Each structure stands twice: as structure tokens, then as C-alpha cells.
Image (cartoon, rainbow, N blue to C red):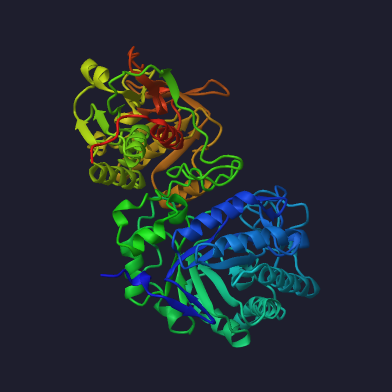
Amino acid sequence: MNHPAAAPFRIGSLELRNRLVVSAHGLATVTEGVPGELDARYWSRLSRGGAGLLIAGGTQVSADSVLRNRILTEAYAERAMSGLRSRAEAMRSGGAVAGIQLGHLGRETLGAGTFLPFVAPSPVRGPREPAAAHTLDDREITRIVEDFRLSARHCAEAGFQVIEIHAAHGYLLAQFLSPFANIRTDRYGAGVPGRARALAEVVQAVREGAGDQVVVGVRVSTEGDGPAHLNLTHLAELLPHVSAEAPFDYLNLTWGDRGRYVPDMATERPPLLGRTAELRAVVRVPLMLCSAFRDPGDIAAALSSGAADLVGSARAHIADPDFARKVLEGRGGEIRPCTACLQDCRTYEPTGLCVVNPDLAPAGEQRRPARPLLLTDSRRASGGGLLVVGAGPAGLECAVTAAERGVRVTLVERAQEIGGQLRIAGAAPNRSGWLELIGYYQRRIDALGIELRLGEPVSVADVEAAGEVVWAIGAEEAAPPVADAVRSGDVTPELFDGAESVLVVDDGFGWWQAIGAVEAALESDVDSVVLATPGAGFATSIPAESRTQFLERHRGGPLEVRVLHRLVAVKPLARLENLLDGRLTELAADVVVQVGERFARPVPVACGTAATAIGDCVAPRQVSHAIAEGRAAGLSSAGTPRCT
């Protein structure tokens, strides 16, 4: 049976080959405001992936919406035209429709800073700045509307077939829509028609600038259900005024404002599924629904129920550029899943990358840089298959990559299940994305005929019989330096049974081990949890959006955070030392969890067999390093081919 997304769909003068959309996003593949060769390569690959429409994001219309790092496309500038043309051509090269999203940041400068004063409809301070932005007057609003017109003309001339106007996520046009950010009393405020006026003027300008053959859409977002959030009821009041003044061809509805619009793996289902009826009743144009669509079943539910006409995703396509094709062909089990970890796609160091997709590379590289550690390059004359020791992320990726190339692979794991550190991380509350990745690897192991041996150590005979050995045996968390504390890697829900108070002590680096222990304790309904860290900040290494979402989940809960404190004793009472003044504080704690240092497990050296080490047994790092090294080792393996 065909997936509901497989049906073609018409918007305005365009027919899309299916109902799947790569929604607007950017990966910092832009230099000095101009898309480069890496940008074109990225969009060309996505076009071959099968989606009907691709929309490039991060495209600005005004100089006062440009960040100092210049990683956003500057569509208003003539010098960006060559890059825009290359991007549009790349998008169309595989049969997709080329779209681009135009926006203005307003007061939301992403915390990166601008050269020019940032602007807003009203003197209401944004969440990332210490003071209110410059308030736009009528003349300045007219100038920004004209900037949209010019940028739309440039994009149409460059070959884009769809232009989407960004009025979501708390950026400038969303600020005009919001009764909380827009407190004007002139014709651009003072009620629903006034708050809708700026967006209507922009829609009209974009339509005129782009011409009649270009489809014009509008993206809006419900910021949440709180009392100070722009919500679905507000949008249902505003959008009829916009469309009456300036009709648009489709509506894109998504979720969240700054800090929340990229939900991490704590959001397991799309937050807007089943919540579009209010808008559908008043906006009579096709509706695209976005936010956290990673599962073919959720996409089917949105389309078959009539909740949406199109479904957009970004991170699902970043993780697997063939996501659309696999959905349409009923190959959901082969999709390399986005875990929603936010660890690489949101950092832009130097460009947006992806933990699970090592083929996404920075400029000048064919894939993510990785160098497996060569232990010995000798080979047995008779050859043999590839033996991978360890079924954590590095070993799993190596085994699957080599088997996909036709190499005969044996994967040996001393534990009873595959996953390694992924399974430990995925056992924490709100971290099930890692379990999805384990499920993917298990399906690939089964489909590729990899010999999997669980619950047994590797033997000398195994090593001697192999043509090549890849050691992926990971790292071990050291025992807590303070007696009677529990290692973070040993935390289970049962640990907190009967406990009333819990102390979790971070190592000062603010990564997920401590946060996972805290959430496990809170889910066990203990009376109090104290998180202590020798560092100067809270959860400083996890993605900023994950930190925001964690705090939202536990606001008002029994959690206390103490920075600049170290653990010195556990019994009879837990004792913390203030690292500034040396004061000691005692507190009752039924369970004390301490994050320990991780050490690489020693790798045996086997003479006579080609041997490589990858992942944490080389140096303890993150999942992205393990997967990238696993991919590199699997691609370089010269093991014996499987019999066919």
C-alpha cells in the first residue's frame, strides 16, 4: 500500500512530486553572506533524496538582520546572486522544487551579535539581550518591507520557484504578530488587524517582487501553551486578516520560539499532531505541518487524517538524505534515524554536521574527518573476514559499513545486548533517541547477514582466524573518587527506590551523565534532588536548547543546583566544599551519584593480524567521533567478501 505522502500535490502553479518537504534550515554553508560550493553539494544531495520541495532557510533580507559571523545568506545583496543561482540549480537537479525562506531576525539576534542596532516593533526586551531593541518607526518598517521585495526579486531571478516568508519562532514578523512583543498603539499594533498589517504588507511585497509564477507561502509558529506565548487561537484570529489583505498560497505551521523550536529527544511525537483543526477552519490554503516529524507513521497520520496537506522535516533529512525515498518506498526500517540529540546540527563548528551521518562534512572534506588508529598492518595470506570487537556505536557503524560493501563481518560483544554507551545513555529519561539508533543498527545487522555473537569475550582463536580485526571496546568510567558514591553509568531507576533525597555530583564539564541521573531521580518521585558541580555553570556542555527544555520540564520541581562545589564525603552525611571560600556544607542524601572520569579500555595487540582501534578505546569522546571512525574503518576494510 502506498504511503499517503507519495501522492503528488499542487500548490498554485506548481505540482510537487510528493507531499514530503525538507523544511527550511541552514547549516552555515555560507561565507560572507554568499552560499558556496559546499552549500550546492548539500542541496543537490537532498534533491536526489526524493522530497517534493526543498526550502533553504537562514536567508536574510536586511543589513540589520545580519550576524557578525556572516553565516546567513544575504539575499538583498547583488553579490549573493551567483550563490543563490547555484543553490536553486542544485535543488532542482534531482527533481525537487526549489524553495527559499526569507526572514528578518528583529530583536532575536541568536545571541551572536550584529554590527547594526537590532530592531523590534516595540521596546520589549528579547530573551537573549540585556536591553530592548531599537523600536521601528513607520519609515523603517516601510524600508524593511521593500527589503523583502528586493530579496524576493533576487530569489526569483536566481531560479527559486517557492518563496516562504518567515513569520515564526519569535523573529521580526512573529514579533509584530505577538500581543506580548508588539505593544504599539499605531496602525501596526493596537489590536488584531494592526498586528497583522506588517505581515500582510510583506506578503504583498514578496508577491510583487517575485512575480506571479512564484509560489508564496507563510511560516508561523505557535510558541506554546503558556499565558505569554503566541498560540493557535491568536494565529486563527490574525491569519484571516493577513490573507484578506494579501493572499498567500500555503501556510506552514510549526512549533516553538527561540530556545524551544528545535525539540530534542524528550519530544518523542510531533507536538502539533491533532491540533490543526482551529487553523484549518479559518485558513483556506494548503497546510504544511512541521516539527519533530521523524517517523513514517507520524507523517502518514498527519496526512491521512487531513490534519495537513504536506509534512516538513529538516533533521530527519540531515541524518539520512534518502529519508524521503525510504518513506515513500516503504523502507522505514532502513532509515538512519535522527536521534534529536542536537549535538552537531546546532553548533556550526565550522558548519552544521550530524552525529549519525558522517557523510555530512565540512568544506574541503568528502566526509567527517576521522582517523582510525592503525595498530598493525600485517595481513594473513589466507585472508579471512573482518572481526569487529565491541558493539558500541563505533563497532556497529564499522560492521554495518563494511557489510554494505560486501565484506564478511563477525561482530563480537561481551554484553548480552548491542549498543554499549548508547544503551546506557538511552536508559535515562527523555533520551530514547539513542535506543532508536540501536534499533536501526540491529535491523541492519539482520538484513546484512552480519554474524553477531553476544555475551562472550573475543578469543585468541577468533583473532588469529580473522583477516582483519577492529577493536571498538570503548571506555570505562572510573570508580567514584569518594567512597560510597555510585558511578553515573550504574544509575538505574531501581537505584532510587525508597530514597527521599538524592545528591548528584557532576565532574564540572556539564555533560549528560549528571543530567540523566538527575532526571532518573526526579522521575522516581524523590522529595529532593541536589545537583552539585565544581564548574561555574549548570549543564554547560549540553546543547543550549536541551538545557532550556530541561529547565522547562522541571521548573517548580524539587531540584536545587549548587555550582562551584565539590564532594568530599558521602557518609554519615554528604559533605560539599565550596571552592571559593572552602566552607563545608552537610546534607542528607540517601543516594549519592558521582560522575567519574572515563578511561580507554586497553586494546590487546595481536601480531600477524591487521588491527585497528576506533572510538573510545582510542580516546574517550562523543558519539559523533565513534560513528565517524567506525565509518572510516568500515570503508577501509579489505576483508574477505561474503559468499553470494
Q: Quadrant of residue 161?
A: bottom right
Q: Quadrant of residue 35?
A: bottom right
State the quadrant of the C terminus: top left
Residue nearer the viewer, 249 or 444: 444
User: x, y (%) of residue 225?
Assistant: 45, 66
Residue nearer the viewer, 534 or 581: 534
Residue nearer the viewer, 635 or 146: 635
Q: Is residue 179 visible?
A: no
Q: Is residue 68 visible?
A: yes
Q: Residue at x 45, y 36 (%)?
A: 628
Please, which residue is most extreme toward the bottom here?
Answer: 244
Left or right of residue 51: residue 212: right
Left or right of residue 45: residue 78: right
When the figure is inspected, residue 425 is found, relative to residue 14, above or below; the finding is: above
User: x, y (%) of residue 329?
Assistant: 32, 62
State the quadrant of the N terminus: bottom left
Residue nearer the viewer, 85 or 432: 85
Q: Quadrant of residue 120?
A: bottom right
